[in-house]
Amino acid sequence: MSEDTEAVDVIVVGAGLAGIACAYRLALAGRSVVLVERGTTAGSKNVSGGRLYTYALEAVEPGLTRAAPFERAVVREQIVMMDDDRSMTVSLAGPPAAAGDLPASVTVLRSRFDAWFADRAEAAGVMLATGIRVDSLLIEDGRVVGIMAGGEEMRAGVVVAADGVNSFLAREAGLVGELSAHAVGIGVKEVIALDAATIEDRFGVGPGEGAATLMLGCTAGVHGGAFLYTNSGSVSLGIVVSPDQMTASGTTTHGMLQALKAHPALRPLIAGGTTLEYAAHLVREDGWRGVPKRLARGGFLVTGEAAGFVLNLGYTVRGMDLALVSGVAAAEAIVAGGDLETAYRAALDRSGLPATMRAADGYADLMGIERLYRTYPGLVLDVVQSMFTVDARAPRPLRTQVRAAMRANHVPLRAVLRDGLVGVRSI
Amino acid sequence: MCFKWVAAEGELRVDPATRAVDASSARRKISDYDRNTIEAARVAAGSIGSELVGLTFGGPDARTGIKDALARGVDRAVHVVADEGARADGHVTAHVLAAQVRRLEDVDLVLCTEGASDTYAHETGPRLGELLGWPVVTNVRELTVEGRTLRAVRVLGADLETVECDLPALVTVVPEVAPAPIPGLRSVLGAAKKPSEQVPVADLGLPAGAVTARTTVTSFLGYVAARRRVVLADGAAQDKVDALVAGLAQDGVLR
């Protein structure tokens, strides 16, 4: 190390929500922190569906939600089951579940939100370096002592890897292996501009309020689903599918998204909108099983999506909230000192993150049921449609209608029972 | 050296029907060619042991640009903050920059880029030199300073012209004057420790005539290339190929 270089307490790699939350909390605790980001601004490379649960923001700092530039407060939850041309929507609207008048979840656009969050961290003393790609870790005597970036070395007491789903730092540190295709979904998303009044009209919400919609049966039978979130002046429409089945399906994620936009249930919601941006992202789908056995080694720990802290629950994907609370836990572990792994596990346990992820562990089995993605939505639509069909004939009993629909969809009763058993066991 | 904070041209949206240009969602950046100018100015300042001051005139959002300029090698930055909504043309910009250059003491050399990547008007540099009453050398691709003398190589089409003048002087440079290296980790972190100053344009004490634009932009439309839109859909494949070849020959594409 040359004379003019100074070491810092902590280097955090990646200015996503986990990285910013970690750096922010460390700075508030008086640590010297460098936050290194590859994009030209914080948030410029960050992609997510766009719904953030506010308990996690409050865990970073009480009152943060009110200060944050979010898009809309989610007041309406919808699940849509669809096949090629039909759809059935379950819509839940009601008072928010969170304490006080704080919305339980909000929609965000990452470029705006992350830039604000990083600004706040900088104001607290975080040294933010954007446009910098970290090439490797600096390891001496089995301990991580810093990073190498563009031929320059920088030293720190601890390096935090918050470098996202495909964390090469965690791999280099030997904590995780290569990502397998079974462990991830591919998410693609379009942000479509619509004016605020149109959004409020179409989704039945007031000013500042929004809807979160999840869709099943729109992925050509491929393991996955779609989401539609309302922002202030746009909607985020995305689809998450399993890549190893995509190739066999003969379609592309982009093709699926375009077909979804043309679906009778979706078309009127986005009519007249112009696509502002298109983004893609890998989404971990292996839940707690995908979290590495060790989250730290000497001078190093991994957090956020890099540590596999993502939950795909079918009806919702949780990434940003887990990123925030794990980033906070990482900061707490570093401040606590002692053995990093022990301190980090303790801080994570306090945050409730492992319990949340373990509770959802069986969802991977539920999500593995192939019939969930084409057969069952079609079956449900057939049954409901026959319920609403009125003609001169005497109505058939519901059980007969269900059996007829099962026959028509080639689903034997024992398959439904087996899938039902998996479903009940997993949730 | 002077730099400009502009909208990223790749992120402008042009409405295909009305050709209206929407810059609201475009990110902002330091004008591309100004990055080369910063590097050339850094080298020139280093060669004579001078401080390099980065000077910009723009709205409040240029703050991010100042950080970038400091990371790229400017020692100190001065941001003259434009009034919200006020429009500046070459006349206003040159008066503002000249007033700020006079406020800095002992300025020997001012570097501007030949043109900014948004307007590319080629006028701020020469206007500024004239207001300062200094010699102006344009289209420069190489410059050296020895004592009180500037030697510059100018690009004249395919030819090169070498010019000498006394300092202080104003030079406008072409992008080839220097590479624009991406700043490293230490430079980026170092930028936060360098001084920068924001000066409201009102503090410069300029008369109203100097800060009132003399030109007015009456329309700002995207340029959409006119296409012939000939569709050869009818007839057998051979007929369509014949029609295509005939059409291309008629337009001089095929001979």
Image (spheres, coloured by chain):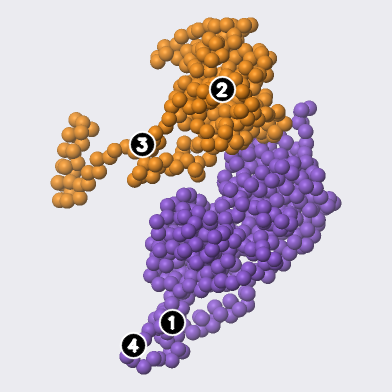
Chain colours: A purple, B orange
Find the residue positioned furthest to the front: B208
Amino acid under label 2?
Answer: Pro
State the residue position of label 2. Answer: B207
Are dots 1 and 2 in contact, CB under 8 Å? no
Q: Is residue B55 visible?
A: yes
**Crowding near pointer 4: few (<14 within 10 Å), some, many (20+)?**
few
State the residue position of label 3. Answer: B223
At mark 1, the secondary structure is: helix
How far separated are the C-alphas under marks 3 and 1?
A: 55 Å
Amino acid under label 1?
Answer: Val
**Front: mark 3 or 1:** 3
**Residue appearing at x 67%, y 16% in the figure:** B105
Q: Residue B18 sits in which quadrant?
A: top left
Q: Chain of mark 4?
A: A
Are dots 3 and 1 in contact, CB under 8 Å? no
Residue A311 picture location, percent across and down: 62, 63
**Residue appearing at x 71%, y 56% in the figure:** A63
Q: Residue B46 sits in which quadrant?
A: top right
Residue A90 picture location, percent across and down: 51, 74
Find the residue positioned furthest to the right: A338
Relative to residue A425, is residue A218 depicted above or below?
above
User: Mark 3 vs mark 4: same chain?
Assistant: no
Q: Chain of mark 2?
A: B
**Front: mark 2 or 3:** 2
How far separated are the C-alphas under marks 2 and 4?
A: 84 Å
**Residue appearing at x 43%, y 72% in the figure:** A87
Q: Chain of mark 1?
A: A
The disc label shown at residue A383, or none = 1
Where the C terminus of chain B falls, by quadrant? top left
Residue B25 picture location, percent across and down: 50, 44
How far separated are the C-alphas under marks 4 and 1?
A: 16 Å
